[in-house]
Image (cartoon, rainbow, N blue to C red):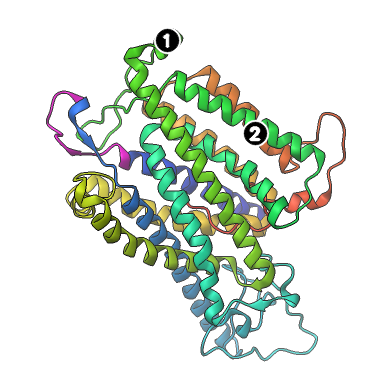
Amino acid sequence: MKTSYTVFLVSGMLLTGTLNTLLTKLQDLQCVGNCDDPDPKRRRLFEQPTWQTLNMFAGETMCLIVLYINILWTNYRLKRRGYRELMTASLGSTDDDNVIEPAALDIPGAVAPTRSAESSLETDSLLPSTLDDTRPLVGRRKFLMWIPALCDICGTTLMNVGLFYISASVYQMMRGAVVIFSGIMSVIFLKHRLQRFQWAALMLIMLGVGIVGMSSVLFPYRPPVLDDGVGGGPAPDEPSLFAAVASSAMEFSERSLLGVLMILTAQIFTAAQFVVEEKIMLRYHVVPMRAVGLEGIFGFVTTAVGIPLLHLAVGRSHPGGYFDMVNGFYEVINNPGVWSTSIAIMFSIAFFNWFGLSVTRTISATSRSTIDTCRTLFIWMSSLALGWEHFQPLQVLGFLVLIYGTFLYNGVVSPPWGAGIDKSVEELTADGSGRRLVDDE
C-alpha cells in the first residue's frame, strides 16, 4: 500500500509540475488581437505577466484552504472515535498517533486531545526539526511571510516575462540556476558550509546553464502558430548555425537573450525567497502547507494592489503593454483559452505544492529534487511532441551537464574523485537551502 501511495505522489508531482509550465506557455501562445490576420507576425499574443503572477498566488492560497479542510475532516473523524477536538500535523496522514498540540498550529476553537501519558506526540516531518526550540508563527509573526512573498512576486513576474521570449524547456532548464544563487546566499546569510564537491557542482551547474542559454541565443525560439488560438501547430523551421547569427534571425536572438537574462535575474529573487523562508523556519515553527498558504495570501493581496498602481504609473501611458490593467482584464475574461488555462494553472499549482510536500515527507527532500529534474525532461519531451520547439543537440549537452551538477550538489551521485559525502547533504533540497516551501510552477 505504501509503495502504491508513493508512486501516486511521485506521478502526481511529475504530472502537475509538468502541467504548470506547459499550461503557462500555452496561455502565452493564445491570440488576443488581430487573430484573423493571415500574417502570424501581426497577431497579438497574451502577454500579461502581472495577471499571471496574481493567478499563481491564487493557486498557493488554495493550499491554505486544503489545510483547513484536512483539519476539519480530521477533527470530525477523531471525534467519532471518542476523542475531543484536535489537530493533526500530518497533511493527509491516517496515523492517529501522528498529532501535535492544537496551539502549535494556532487554530481557534481546538482543544488538546485526551490521550494517555504513554502515547507519544510525534511531529510530522513537514515541521522543522527544531520545533522544541522555536516559537509558533502566530499573530503578527505571520506577516514575516510577506517578505518571501515579495521576493516571489519579483521572481515570478520576471520569469513570466522571460517565458514570452524563450521555449518552455529552456525556461525550465534556466531555472536550475537558482541552485547557484541560493547556495551562495546560504553560505553568506545562513552560515551553511558547502563541501568541496558542492562548490564543484555549482561550477558545473553554471556551465550547464551557460550552454543552454547559448543554445537559446544561437537557435532562437520562434513562437509556433496555434490553430484558432487553442491548439499547437508546428514551429517555424529552425535556422542553421550560420543562419542563426545572421541578420534575419537577429531579432529573435535578441529576444531570446533578453528572456534568458530575465530568467537568470529572477533566480536571484527566488534564491532570496528560499533563504528568507529558511531563516523564518529556523526561528518559528509552522506547517509548510500553512506557510505556502500565507505566502499565497500576502502575495495575492500585494499583487492585486500593485496591478492598479502599475497601471496608473506605467500602463495607461503604454496601452496594450504589460502593465495595462484594463486591457489585461478584458484579455483574460474575453478569451476562453486564457481564462480556462488560468483556472487549470491555479489548480495545478495548488496540487503541485501538496504533492511536493507529501513527497518530501514520504520519501526525502533529495528524492524530490531528483523528481523535479525529471520534470524538466517531461516538459522538454512534451514541447517537442507538441511541435512548440525543435530538437537541439547543444541544448542536450547543456541539460546533461546541468543534471549532473544538480545531482552532484544534492548528493545523489558521488564525486568522481572519491570524496565522501556528508549525510547532512541529503537534507538539502534542490534550491540549496534546508527547507524549501513553495513550488511556484
Indicate the quadrant containing the N terminus: top left, top right, bottom left or bottom right: bottom right
Question: Residue shown at 28%/50% (left/top)?
Answer: 323
Q: Secondary structure at mark 1?
A: loop
| 257 sits left or right of 371 in the view | left
> Which picture quadrant has residue 406?
top right
Closer to the camera in the image, 53 or 63? 53
- Would you say residue 227 sits in the magenta stretch? no
| 124 sits left or right of 229 in the view | right
Question: Residue shown at 25%/55% (left/top)?
Answer: 311
**Pointer 2: what residue?**
205
Question: Residue shown at 20%/51% (left/top)?
Answer: 316
The answer to whether any part of residue 52 appears in the image is yes
Residue 149 position, x and y percent, is 48, 61
Q: Residues within 10 Å of mark 1 (few under 14, many from 20)?
A: few
Residue 129: which numbered mark, if any? none
Give amino acid for label 2.
Ile
CB under 8 Å between callouts 1 and 2? no
The answer to whether residue 424 is above or below residue 139 is above
Q: Which region of the structure is painted magenta?
A: 27-40
Q: Secondary structure at mark 2?
A: helix
Separation (CA) of disc 1 from disc 2: 27 Å
The answer to whether residue 234 is above or below residue 268 is above
Give amino acid for label 1.
Ser
**Pointer 1: what residue?**
240
Question: Residue shown at 76%/83% (left/top)?
Answer: 119
| 75 sits left or right of 129 in the view | left
Closer to the camera in the image, 67 or 208? 208
